[in-house]
Amino acid sequence: MRIGFIVIILLAVLVHAYVLWHVYQVLPFPVWAKWMVVGLMVASLLMMFAGFMGVFDRMPLWLASSCYNISTSWLIVFLYLLIAFVLLDVGRLCHLVPKEWLYCNAWTAGAVTAVIAGLLVYGNIHYNNKVREPLSLTTAKHISKPVKVVMVSDLHLGYHNRKAEWQRWVKMINDENPDLILVAGDIIDGYVRPLLEEDVAADFHQLKAPVVACLGNHEYITGIDKSLDFYRQAGVTLLRDSTVTVGDLVIAGRDDRFNQKRKPLQHLLDGVDSTKYIILLDHQPYNLEEAQQAGVDFQFSGHTHEGQVWPISLMVNAMYEKAWGPLQKGNTRYYISSGLGIWGGKYRIGTRSEYIVATISH
């Protein structure tokens, strides 16, 4: 395990050195200006690791929020710089790109900067354009009247998705006039301090329908005790390997698989009234066949974000049986959400931020 971790760190250092060396070489600036640009890039990376070590929590909220957004946005910039320089290097080796394009070239530097800036602007606009996904769920089981359920996952409330943004989402959800709101984990991003300082929990009480949720892995990253305190303040019904009956529905919520001692799904559903429509909340969409085998009618998951940006989305789609969208296995239907919020920089490139409006009827 230790050797694998060291190998990953070395590869990360080498890849960053590759990108930063190319940036230094291509910029048509004096040496001192080149070093300043490279230094700012390194500082952005180090800033993110400083945040993981708790430095953000000791900053004024506005400064911590800015540092979070800058440092995590650098990851997206770095990704596209890496792609650009690999393509240019391959082109040079194949004698399709002149060597001069990679050294002190204002045209190359300007073109790469413009393309990445354009992608970030598009990605931010696309992220803020939340997609409403309607879903019709019919069943042979008894449903006395159609039930309207808004389902969301991966809010990631914290230094980047702050109180004002959550208030906009609350209005958007309330405008649907749902009977029930389901959240498939990761309400908290990784830092509980901004939620407490801005009293974000109070805005959960403005939702006009009961909120039922399961935990995500980020609640454990935040610190499970802190996360549970926030859920209690927010008035959210939290299901940790437990169930609750809401009218004609049974909602089952699994603890996140981060907890290796969580109950097997079959044990969780022991004694549940199978004549009722059973909805499973399970943050991470692994072992989807378990819900089918347990007689679940519908499973709602999140976690994947569908990779957030291309081409990470290609890798994420290869990792999961289903990384985003609807699926059916036997009589069990599934929806894997790409999330309403996001981790890190607010960019959606080739993916989307969404909320699901499901109608459950007989």
Image (tube, grey):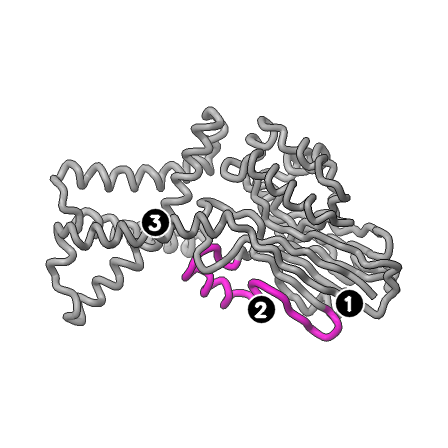
Q: CA distance from mark 3 to mark 1?
A: 44 Å
Q: Secondary structure at mark 1?
A: strand
Q: Identify the residue at horizontal 21%, vertical 37% (top origin).
A: 36
For the residues bearing labels 2 and 1, Cβ distance under 8 angstroms = no
The numbered mark at residue 77 is 3
Three-letter residue code for mark 3:
Val
Q: Is residue 340 left or right of residue 25?
A: right
Q: Identify the residue at horizontal 68%, vertical 31% (top origin).
A: 202
Spot occupied by residue 65 in the image (x, y as percentages of width and height): 46, 33
The quarter in which the C terminus is drawn is bottom right
Q: Identify the residue at horizontal 78%, vertical 49% (top origin).
A: 179
Binning the other alpha carbons within 10 Å of mark 3 as few (below 14), some (14 to 19) or many (20 upward) gives: some
Q: CA distance from mark 2 to mark 1?
A: 24 Å
Three-letter residue code for mark 2:
Glu
Mark 2 = which residue? 321
User: In which image quadrant can residue 48 be found?
Assistant: top left
**Magenta stretch in the rendered image:** 306-332
Q: Secondary structure at mark 3?
A: helix
